[in-house]
Amino acid sequence: MVTELGRQPWIIYGIVRTAAAITPAPGLVISFWVSAAIYVALTAACVVLLLRLAEATRTGGEADFAEEGA
Amino acid sequence: VTATAVDYAVVGILWVAVVLYAVLAGADFGGGVWDLFARGPRADAQRLAVSRAMGPVWEANHVWLIFMITGLFTGFPTAFQALALGLYLPFSLVLIGIVLRGAAFAFRAHAAGGGARRRFGLGFGIGSIITPFLLGACAGAVATGRATRQPQTPADLLLPWTTPFALVCGALALAICAGLAAAYLTVETSRAGETTLAEDFRRRALAAGAATFLLAAIALPLTNATAPFLWSGLTGPGLPLAGAAAAFAAVAGLAMWRRRYQAARAAAIAQVGCILLAWAVAQTPLLVPPTITIEGSASEPEVMAALLITMVIGAALLLPSLALLFYVFKGRNPAAN
């Protein structure tokens, strides 16, 4: 956040402005919202899974690691 | 050393990365396909075999995609820009596919309950199908010379990669990835003594090989009609490599039929390499048809020289590391099983 926001309005500090570097392709707004939605969904799934793992370990049961562990 | 030689050396290294990405990450995508289509009494055993084969190395395989992107960006910025604009939508979808299948694969391993595990498995399988399909369609778009048009309307985002030729290329890429994965899995399962599983993957490899053959038979006349750059190159300088690809395909099919799994795997890898390099040679001196050439889109000679030196040093560090990774997890290492 610090590196990305602190550098604005430049995309390359002192050389190219973000506004000049933006893609001319249509649909950027959709792309933004889809990316944001994916980040939110993945974060939620990750938190839920970590809480379940913590719960399983705390209650003394076998944490449900599949054998295929990634 | 002339500037042209440096440009071509960099392009050559990038094409080698394309081949490595296809035979390594391509097999990961194919593994996801067989995970989704795991059927019968050994469905769970098949999924486990896929996970065991992919687990240790699969994130490492995406290093080649990142290498291709940064190499193209640094060495051939105008080609990069044209592709990034012309194939904006399919590349975005590919990115989503790679992220979602990776997340689904990792989450599934820790998901409690069959329902959640099935849903993550579905996400993993669907991501594994659409990603190689879209990459193949993008390759088809490049070969037809439609990938460099800057999109103006939403329809322009779809047109380059939804031609019949590009869609057949997408299906072809999917069939090739599935065939590679099945060939690798016959070796891994038979080495582990799981002969019935090896038989399952043998049947899948033969089916994928038949699908590849049929799709190639459809693609060839379409190439003649819609991808003139590719066709003239394939019937000219690319012909030896295209012929070698067909020969390796026949060898791979025959070896798989005779249960010579190691030979089948080697021939399948050679086949994919020859297909991609035939394409590379066929469209040289173009980098992105119809107008972007290798020399015309290369960065300044100083940048290209620095890039080539960096690539060589990077390879000296990366290749032994990857060799060690594969040796530890894929060699005859009893601790890995």
Image (cartoon, coloured by chain):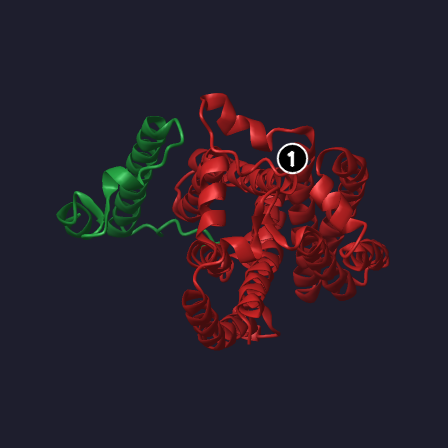
Chain colours: A green, B red
The residue that appears at 65% across and 38% down in the rendered structure is B144
Q: Nearer the viewer, residue B297 or B13?
A: B297
Residue B198 image-quadrant placement: bottom right
User: In the rendered view, does B321 fall on the left or right side of B210?
Assistant: left
Q: Position of residue B39 (x, y in %)?
A: 66, 39
Q: Position of residue A54 (x, y in %)?
A: 26, 49
Residue B224 image-quadrant placement: top right
Q: Name the residue tied to disc 1.
A: B166
> How many numbered marks does the figure carry?
1
Q: Chain of mark 1?
A: B
Q: Nearer the viewer, residue B141 or B292?
A: B292
Residue B257 image-quadrant placement: bottom right
Q: Is residue B39 visible?
A: no
The residue that appears at 58% across and 33% down in the rendered structure is B161
The residue that appears at 69% across and 66% down in the rendered structure is B191
Is B294 drawn above or below residue A26 in the view shown? below
Q: Nearer the viewer, residue A44 or B306?
A: B306
Q: Amino acid at mark 1?
A: Ala
Q: Position of residue B297 (x, y in %)?
A: 50, 53
Q: Is residue A64 visible?
A: yes
User: In the rendered view, does B173 fall on the left or right side of B324?
Assistant: right
Q: Nearer the viewer, residue B47 or B246?
A: B246
User: In the rendered view, does B257 fall on the left or right side of B95?
Assistant: right
Task: Classify 10 Å Cα crowding around label 1: few (below 14), some (14-19), many (20 and above).
Answer: many
Secondary-structure class at tag 1: helix
Is A7 drawn above or below residue B327 in the view shown? above
For the N terminus of chain B, the image quarter is: bottom right
For the C terminus of chain B, the image quarter is: bottom right
Is B39 drawn above or below residue B320 in the view shown? above
Q: Position of residue B217 (x, y in %)?
A: 82, 39
